[in-house]
Image (cartoon, helix red, strand yellow):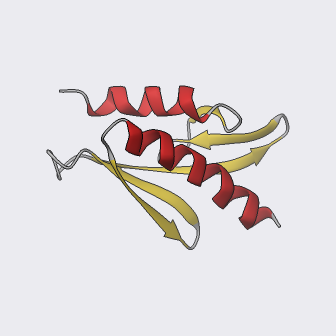
Amino acid sequence: MREHTRTYFLGRLADELEARGLEVTLRSNPPALKVSSGESAMLTETVDCVPLSDGWFYRWSWGEVLGLADDPEAAAQRIARLFRV
C-alpha cells in the first residue's frame, strides 16, 4: 500500500512538472522521479516522496523536504526554479 501511495503522489508531481515543460521519468524501484529540462541534459534532479509524522512529503535527492505531497503544484514550482537558467 505504501508504494502505491508514493507512486500516486509522484504521478501527480510528474503531471505538474511536464505541464511546465520539464522532462520526467518515473523510476520504479524505489519509486522516484528523474527530472531534467531537456535543454540541459547535464542538469538532472531526483525527487522522491516519503511519509513523515505530518503526512507525505516530496524530498530532494539530498534529503531536504521539498514540500507537502498534497500540494504538487507548489513543489513543481520550486523544482522548476532549479532549472531556470
Quadrant of res 63:
top right
Q: Residue placed at 75% from the left, 57% from the top?
A: 5
On the image, the x and y values in percent for residue 6 come to 69, 57
Instruction: From the viewer's side, name the closer residue of 54 and 23.
Output: 23
Quadrant of res 71:
top right
Residue lying farthest to the front in this orientation: 19
Q: Is residue 43 above or below residue 65?
A: below
Please give left or right for residue 32 compared with residue 22 in the image.
Answer: right
Looking at the rendered image, the quarter that the N terminus falls into is bottom right
Please give left or right for residue 78 compared with residue 45 in the image.
Answer: right
Residue lying farthest to the bottom in this orientation: 29
Q: Residue placed at 56% from the left, 36% from the top?
A: 64
Q: Is residue 6 above or below residue 84?
A: below
Residue lying farthest to the left in this orientation: 39
Q: Is residue 21 above or below residue 47?
A: above
Looking at the rendered image, the quarter that the C terminus falls into is top left
Q: Is residue 40 above or below residue 25?
A: above
On the image, the x and y values in percent for residue 52 come to 78, 42
On the image, the x and y values in percent for residue 8 come to 67, 56
Q: Residue placed at 27% from the left, 34% from the top?
A: 83
Q: Residue placed at 48% from the left, 33% from the top?
A: 76
